[in-house]
Image: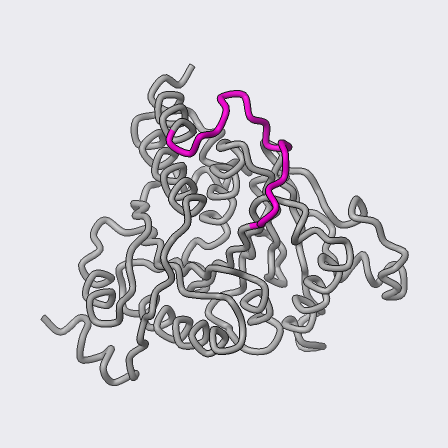
Amino acid sequence: MNAPFDAALSQLRSEAAIEPDAPATGPVKKETQIIAIYGKGGIGKSTTSSNLSVAFSKLGKRVLQIGCDPKHDSTFTLTKCLVPTVIDILESVNFHSEELRPEDFVYQGYNGVMCVEAGGPPAGTGCGGYVVGQTVKLLKEHHLLEDTDVVLFDVLGDVVCGGFASPLQHAGRALIVAANDFDSIFAMNRIVAAIQAKARNYEVRVGGVIANRSAATDQIDKFNARTGMRTLAHLPELDAIRRSRLKKSTLFEMEPTPEIVAVQTEYLRLAATLLAGTEPLDAHPLKDRDIFDLLGFD
């Protein structure tokens, strides 16, 4: 038994008016929350996305996570393996998508989370962004973006052009994962600019930043104060989080030490916050020179 975790889960379910025994495959709400998660390469987006997906499922929601990276390991800890990618499956039917059924490319992960990996072309032979666009098209053909409660797009690095920006055309909120350092904040600034550009023609809006792998948040706080961003969650740098990835495990499957329970609870709190609805941010990205002047020169 994990009493602290169970108590936190019960409280958050109560606050969200979720029945205690609500399964992850429960009734689908009419409006699906679609969230795109961006951030600097290697900052922990896949770990963040997978654990957030589980948190949503623990709150009784049907969840679909879509990996949008050619290395196709976004859902690795959920499925315990590298699942076949959409591009591989499309190639096997000579790109006749009408021959495919959802079960051909959707795989069930831990606690009922549905998993899709877009994949990508061989190195140096094509556009990975195109593959993301084709994946979104296939998901829409099978109504998978509408037939779940929450959809999470885990998007490659800070690349926000072409097909890698296509999730922004479908998402209601875009979240950015960043550490408390210059490089990831610099990437976040560019991503904010891309989201705001898409917001002129689509419903997507900036939701906020998830501070990851960081003991402190002072640099992120400076950026937020200057641009109008906000921090939605703070996840510390713990070796247990690194080890969970090596164990092909989400944090919700790890031994419930006090530090693990604290992180689990933070993910549950973030999921509940997003389900309740977050106000869109009118964030204003900085010019490159202004970021250099703002950060790291105290």
Residue closer to the observer: 176 or 35? 35
Query: At 25% from the left edge and 85% from the top edge, which residue is drawn?
Result: 289
Horizontal and vertical percent position of residue 274: 42, 47
Q: Which residues are magenta?
A: 15-32
Q: Left or right: 191 with respect to 259? A: right
Q: Dominant secondary structure of the magenta stretch?
A: loop
- Residue at image point 39% right, 58% down: 177
> Can residue 19 be found in the magenta stretch?
yes
Q: From the viewer's perspective, is residue 17 above or below residue 49?
A: above
Please tell me which residue lies in front, 9 or 149. Answer: 149
Relative placement, left or right, of 118 versus 171 is: right
Q: Quadrant of the C terminus?
A: bottom left
Number of numbered labels in the structure image:
0
Residue 172 part of the magenta-drawn span: no
Residue lying furthest top: 1
Residue drawn at x 32%, y 41% is: 238
Q: Nearer the viewer, residue 296 or 176?
A: 176
Residue 126: x percent and y percent? 70, 77
Quarter location, residue 282: bottom left
Q: Is residue 79 left or right of residue 239?
A: right
Snapshot colouring = one colour
Q: Quadrant of residue 111?
A: top right
Q: In the rendered view of the protein, which quadrant contains the N terminus?
A: top left
